[in-house]
Image (cartoon, rainbow, N blue to C red):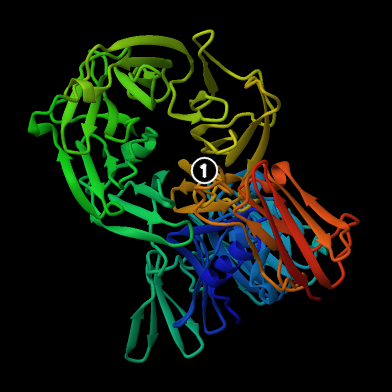
Amino acid sequence: MKIIPRIFVVLFLITQVMAADIWQSTSNPFPIYDGVPYGAGVMLATGGGIRYRSLNDDQMFHSEDGLETSKFSSIAATKGGLLAISEFGQIAVYVDARNAWRVMNRSYVSNKSHVVAGSAASAEFVLVIPFEDRLAFFDIHKESSIITINRIGSKSLVDDGVTRVAIHGDSLYVRLKSEVYARKMNWNDMMQDARLNDPESWIKQDPSADIEGLDLRDSVWTIEANNGSFEMTSESIHYVNGSQREDLSKRDDIQMHSFYEVTNMPNGGFLAATTYGKFGASEAVHWWVSSFAYDGYGSNEAASNLRMKTLSVLPNGYIFFHPWGQGFFIFEKDGNEMVYAFKPSSGHCFDEFVDNFPVAFSSIPAPDGSGFLTASLSNDGYSLVYFTKNGEVHCAKNIGSTIAGGPMYAKIDDDGSWVVYVGTKESFGYGEEGGLDIVRFSAPKSNGNELVNVKVKSVNGIHPSPSDAAYDSVGNRLWLVSSSMIAYYDEESDTLLSPTSINGVLGADFTSIEADVHGNLWVGSSNQGVFRLSLKGKSPDSLSTIRYTTKNGLFDDDVKDLAIDPVLGVACFAHENGMSCVTRNDLKRAKGNMTDSAKADVAAYPIPFRPKIHRAFIIENIAENASVSIYNRGGALIQYFHGEDVYGGRIDWDGMGKDGKLVTPGVYYYVVKSPTKTKKGKFIVIH
């Protein structure tokens, strides 16, 4: 088996192919549900994707590798190839030549019935898939379902579900919760079995009979492979060869799970919080786990369930975080070192919802970068709390129109005062009525960092209460999202309004929202993946939609949170058992390109350009209002790029002329022209 080093491939693609979306996922490859020997190792079905593990190789396959999902319950080595069966019965086949997967069939997925973990079996070109309430027979050759049955003998599989199946010769044995049945099968021609759907054609067996493969699997099981064996539990894998025993459980890139919040770092990269008390930091390819566990020792499930957004970062790298009910903390060095701990027992001014139990749902950097802002829950109305980066705590007590403050945004007004927008919540759940408080007060630095002259204006109009907010700097507009509603604050009418038309969004449970550098809104959901919303014109009342799901490369359609990094041009999406990121040209900030303060000059590569080897000729560090022209040696215009073509300050030319044909070898010229500067260059095309 040829396992291609994944990180090399990803870095190569990021360098060479920026025209298309590039997806990369990382996951915790557990629990292990099933495994089969493959090459020098084993191929494993896990809750974080398909994992190939040998003594020397370790590779994860996710949605972007052709699987279209990342939760797998079973895997089977069949005459038709290596097949992976997802938690709801999607079937994918491994394509060795491409080191990737291809989806064979999706017909079972719509039933939303769970596959019995580790129990698929095959004979000839027939795959038998036990679901929790039915038994499916699948034709591998034709890549289609043969039949699905829901009764065996006198038993309904809905009430007395399948726990294991085993194939011995022409007999299929099925263990239900209470009984065992068997049936003769014509594996070579299942369609000719007229009684396959007849429950009475099954013969009841002695439940105590010793039938290989039919007993429930032990908590520790072994897979024999070349030159040794692999001993596994749901949470571990060991290689055993005589006296040699090596733990192969961990992965080198990361072994994190239970992500529920992610934010971008000011200088590029991401920081994520987990429910079990660790931070994860990344530049979007590798993830590093923090050595320090914040004070949420153990579970911080409440923060995830209530969709809290309390992770925020200052330009100096200081990180603010609030684990549910346990105080407020400032960290540095990607969350590895604590700088300040603001405990409820220390006598600070922030509220305690119950004794020694403060609660806040959101935090943001102060608009001048001097510290952080949050809103602490109180039965007398939430309080606005200002934590300076020097460790001071200042409060505007009980100013809120509701007991809880939700998502926040802050800016400095023309007169120097601070304006803080706080989503409002009638209770600490996210299903209550909500609105928006606009809180205005004098700049704290002019008042010894105290919050004085506070004025609050309240606006209702979002149901349920908001769980996240994003500011679109292009349209100068604040957006809020609740579990079922998207709304924006209209300053002229001083109201919260919902767009009248959002095509392609129906029945989504929204979890998060961010705005990119071009004013597009990225909205995460718990059930339908991610939506990219764009204004059809200048009005926010009509939005067009692009949806991203596991079929596009998203790790999981359940998105806990999302963040966009305009430095790297990457969006990352947090999931329960992993993180997925997409690289796009139009996510990258290019505002300073081709100016006197630009950090890098216009660059073009590779030179020479080989269209049949290189995927694109790249010109980068260009202004977004520039145009790019490519000419042949005779001065004829071959290709022209402008507008959205140059979003992100980069173009990718595939070597095709305006006629759609590959250009001939030779010398070519490019001209990059902005309103203020022009850059020219020469390069060679070689076939």
- Report whether 622 appears left or right of 318: right
SS of the residue under disc 1: loop
Percent position (x, y) of residue 192? 83, 63
- Looking at the picture, tell me which residue is in the foreground, 218 or 215: 218
Percent position (x, y) of residue 132? 55, 50
Q: Is residue 474 above or below residue 554?
A: above
- Observer able to see residue 170: no
Q: Residue furthest right?
A: 659
Quadrant of the rendered image containing residue 411: top left
| Image point (53%, 56%), residue name | 600
Label 1 sits on residue:
558
Q: Is residue 290 above or below residue 521?
A: below
Q: Which quarter of the figure is the C terminus placed in?
A: bottom right
| Image point (88%, 58%), residue name | 636
- Looking at the picture, tell me which residue is in the foreground, 606 or 501: 606
- Looking at the picture, tell me which residue is in the foreground, 614 or 635: 635
Percent position (x, y) of residue 471? 48, 29
- Report whether 266 appears left or right of 380: right
Q: Is residue 380 above or below residue 360?
A: above
| Image point (46%, 48%), residue name | 575
- Observer able to see residue 446: yes
Q: Residues within 10 Å of mark 1 (few under 14, many from 20)?
A: many
Percent position (x, y) of residue 226? 51, 88
Q: Is residue 99 above or below residue 55?
A: above
| Image point (50%, 42%), residue name | 559
Give amino acid for label 1: Asp
